[in-house]
Image (tube, rainbow, N blue to C red):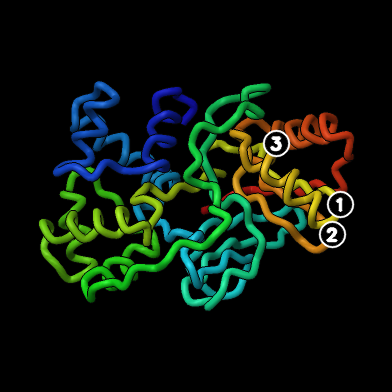
Amino acid sequence: MEQPENLRLLRSMAVALPLTPDPVEALATGFRLPRRELAARLAGLREEGVLLGFWGEPNPALAGTETRFGGTGVLRWAGRLESGELLESRTDLNAGANTTVFLKAGTPPIVEEGDALLHPDQDRTCQIEQFPLPRQPLQAVEERMAAALSVPLSFDGGTDLWEQAGSAAGCTAGEAVMVIRRLVVNRHWRRLAAKLNLGRAGWLGCGVARWEMDTATARQAGAALAALRCTGDVWIEEGALAGLFIARREDEGRKAAAEVARQWGRPVARWDSLMLEQ
């Protein structure tokens, strides 16, 4: 799993899968590998419990959608604190109103290390727009596809991906790719992507940092925190700003949070190491 090409492959698939006639072939071409070899790598990653499958990531910026910890909704990520407590981040598509204050929602599998973790993030897809996006009505087949891919669907590189998706949603492979494309283009989904167990993949330096500050200050500081490469979720709690730091090497997330604290002149009020599981 330490092979650099495997790490880059995982990051690429977690950002998005290509909506081409054969996504596995497109990935293989991009990584200059024979399709058969890439399919074998995917099978190995699945057997190791690293590759959980592929899913349609719901867009947390949609009107009537709320991102929260625990409760109901689509599971975005889950991890265990050192205490053994399970922390789950969920997107509730039927909350009715956006009431939680999340500035960024995501778990990017960062491959950089050290100072590069604090560089600006060029991928802005995880940041949540200030104003909720209008929700487009879904056709029946789109509803079925959104429900079927709200959980990871097993990713078998030896089988046509669109056939697998179509079978899960009750449509043909040709219909599946068109339906998925509409869900992404209409922004009901952020992306069609691989779902990973980052802990098993070797991301061992993750954790949650909290700073005590008032809401107005937290909004300004949170926007800066959300723009960093190493942060996943960034949210405002009562009297605090919190951020999920994602890093591969042990203690690197904590060090990144400490460097942010040094630059801000505000100490980290609390750090909780987190082992991401999905």
Is 266 rendered above or below residue 84? above
Label 2 to label 3: alpha-carbon separation:
22 Å
**Marks 3/1: CA distance?**
19 Å
Tell me what residue is drawn at x 42 percent, y 66 percent: 134
Q: Earlier in the sequence, mark 3 or mark 1?
A: 1
Mark 3 packing: few (<14 Cα in 10 Å), some, or many (20+)?
many
Q: Position of residue 261 (x, y in %)?
A: 83, 36
Where is residue 104 drawn, in percent x and y? 59, 50
Q: Find out whether the residues at labels 1 and 2 contact each other: C-beta distance under 8 Å.
A: yes
Residue type, label 3:
Gly
Residue under label 2, please give it.
Answer: 239
Write the residue at 46% across / 31% down. 1
Upstream in the sequence, badge 2 or badge 3? 2
Q: Position of residue 16 (x, y in %)?
A: 36, 43
Which kind of residue does numbered mark 1 sit on?
Answer: Glu
Tell me the residue at 66%/29% (across/down).
118
Mark 1 / mark 2, whichever is N-terminal? 1
Q: Residue 166: which quarter of the image?
A: bottom left
Tell me residue 57's x, y (percent).
Answer: 41, 56
In the rendered image, which residue does mark 1 sit on? 212
Which structural element holds mark 2? loop
For this rendering, which residue is in front, 159 or 140? 140
Tell me if 160 is positioned left or right of 53 in this view: left
The correct choice, above or below, for 81 with respect to 146 in the image is: above
Number of the label disc, if any, that sits on residue 253: 3
Observer-nearest residue: 99 or 161? 99
